[in-house]
Image: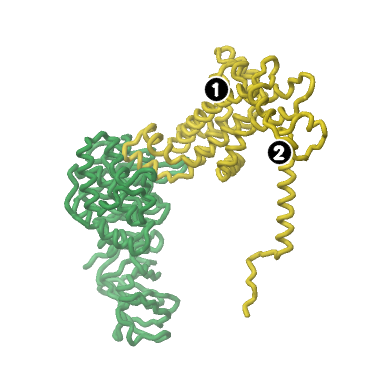
Amino acid sequence: MNMQALQAGPVSGVRVRELGVRYGEQDVLAGLDLDVQAGEFLVLLGPSGCGKSTLLHSIAGLLDTAAGSIEIGGQDMTFADPSARGIGMVFQSYALYPNMTVLGNLSFGLRVAGVPRAEIDRRVQQTAQMLQLGPLLARKPSHLSGGQRQRVAIGRALVRQAGVYLLDEPLSNLDAQLRTELRRELKLLHRALGATMIYVTHDQVEAMTLATRIAIMRQGVIQQIGTPQEVYERPANRFVAGFVGSPAMNFVEGTLAAAAGGVDFQSPALQLHFPGSVAVAGTAVLGVRPEQIRIDASGAFNGTVQLIEPMGGQQVVWLQCGSQTLAAVVHHVAGLALDQVVRFHIDAASVSLFDATSGTRIPMRSI
Amino acid sequence: MKAARRSVGGQGAWGRLGIYAFLVLAALFFLAPLYVMLVTSFKSMDEIRAGQLFAWPSQPTLAAWQTAWSEACTGLACEGVRVGFWNSVAIVVPSTLLPILVGALNGYALSFWRPRGGDLMFAVLMLGAFIPVQVMIYPLVKVLAATGLFASLPGIVLVHLAFSMPVMTLLFRNHYLSLPAELFKAARVDGGGFWRIFWQLMLPMSTPIIIVAAIMQVTGVWNDYVLGLVFAGAENLPMTVQLNNVINTTTGERLYNVNMAATILTSLVPLVVYLVSGRWFVRGITAGAVKG
């Protein structure tokens, strides 16, 4: 990809306040606030039906909002026409105009806006060069491969030199290999342009790799917003903890009780001591990432190897500890056999604790 | 040795023979009237009087066709069905183009712009499709007479436009609903307005459904009798009405050969449409049959 910078227009931030969206009688979004900084790559992540696409389409002005306001680049755009919002958009189904050539697709928006011909040519050429679309300009979308189509769709957004780019699951229709390839290109593109991007996906790997910040949504509510690192290491609740990370976080139910020099987590399978204090006592859920379980002969816990899933560079080992099954990521399985009892270690400093009923994270204070 | 490979669900030679026998019989049954019409139109009246209905014409002649086209009497005038042919063409062309355009606009607005009350209006329009045409003739005559459009070419075109609206709207609405909504959204982000998206994006993507709509309108309007008789006026009577007049105007002897030729001439346009566009024609029938 030729990373000659194209962006010449302004780079805008987005401010969403108290946003409400309704489908008939049902509130899809209610009282939603979101701030997107200029130049940020924000990923809206969540399962299908969580309202992430609704939020994106509201920002684009493609949906009527029931309440609240949307500001783009410091201007109130709540009721502005989509084309007046200074946005470029990429859709999951590419949504290329099938009756127009690639050139026609790229230039359509500029022609509608009455941009002078010379300027249209310049921008289209530049975009085509950046996305390697030059040889395809005369073709119709039906004569393009999936990856080429999505490049054209991205190009169509880029020629608009918008303040914000909205991407609605742009990679989900591509096969796995192409997806990884285009993901990398998108990230490079963001770096080269410094543009604001809001990206919707249900794929947590895409979210982790692309985002400067991730907003995880569930049932119309943003559960947590933070850098990929923060979201991964300090999930705000059990939903976020379970949704981000693959293989998923292990959850162990137990009780918290004060003990000498800290707190003890007690469960039939595991007992952990934390050198700190927590506000809540009683039942709690321990969250352990699979890579935080280290198989180690001197470990404090033991379990039976139930299953080994090879994943190339690493293996997922499923351990049976009493009634509990724990997944552990292991890099060398040498010496591990099925039904073998192994000892393992968990570092108390890196795990998470959640309230058993509300599911929210229990903060730990070190003494 | 390898055994002969059977096909999935094959019925064997006898079953296949039965199917073909039935198909041939059915085809003969439906083709027989057409055959009789054709051979009769090439016979002279003397030969017809001999009563050999299925016999091949002994001296084939085009005289009856000539008479039917340009000399047969429709009441007092004896100019054949030729006049009706051109009248029908003059009615069919605008009565095909206008309904397609307006129907496409309706369907486009209903499926993409979703105006408030659009669903209700569509439901009312569909209701109109179930009210028999005959019920509306009298009020329509009054309305057209009051506006001075009665018994004129614009009048009959307007009537055809009105009666075609339910099916045309339904056809285009369903077609546009089958297109991805994201296409429309992309065009909105690109700044396209109502008309630009319609002319530059939706209409160019409607070719298949336009063909289906054109087939339905051409055959429907061409075959129309009652609306043409009532609303077109004496100057613009369509070919179907002229044909009826030819057949009902008898001076002395009933000219079966001329009647047959005139009938074939009148049904030629739908027949050609059918033969040229067989695949699309079937699609048109099913599209019209599956309401909603």
The answer to whether the residues at label 1 and label 2 have Cβ atoms under 8 Å apart is no
Q: Indicate the quadrant containing the N terminus of chain B: top left, top right, bottom left or bottom right.
A: bottom right
The residue at the point 50 percent across, 40 percent down is: B209
Q: Is residue B56 left or right of residue A173?
A: right
Q: Nearer the viewer, residue A128 or B109?
A: A128
Instruction: Give the residue type at disc 2.
Output: Leu
The residue at the point 29 percent across, 43 percent down is: A16
| Vertical arrangement, residue B74 with respect to residue A305, above or below | above
SS at badge 1 = helix
| Vertical arrangement, residue A281 with respect to residue B234, above or below | below
Q: Give the labeled residue for mark 1.
A: B158
Q: Is residue A338 left or right of residue A183?
A: right
Instruction: Give the residue type at disc 1.
Output: Leu
| Vertical arrangement, residue A341 with respect to residue A158, above or below | below
The shade of chain B is yellow
Q: Position of residue A179 (x, y in %)?
A: 33, 60
Q: How is the image coloured?
A: by chain
Marks 1 and 2, the one that precedes in the sequence: 2
Q: Position of residue B96 (x, y in %)?
A: 53, 30
Q: Position of residue A130 (x, y in %)?
A: 22, 52
Tag on residue B34?
A: 2
The shade of chain A is green
Q: Nearer the viewer, residue B97 or A245?
A: B97
| Vertical arrangement, residue A266 with respect to residue A336, above or below | above
Mark 1 vs mark 2, foreground winner is 2
Residue B92 seen: yes
Q: Nearer the viewer, residue B143 or B268?
A: B268
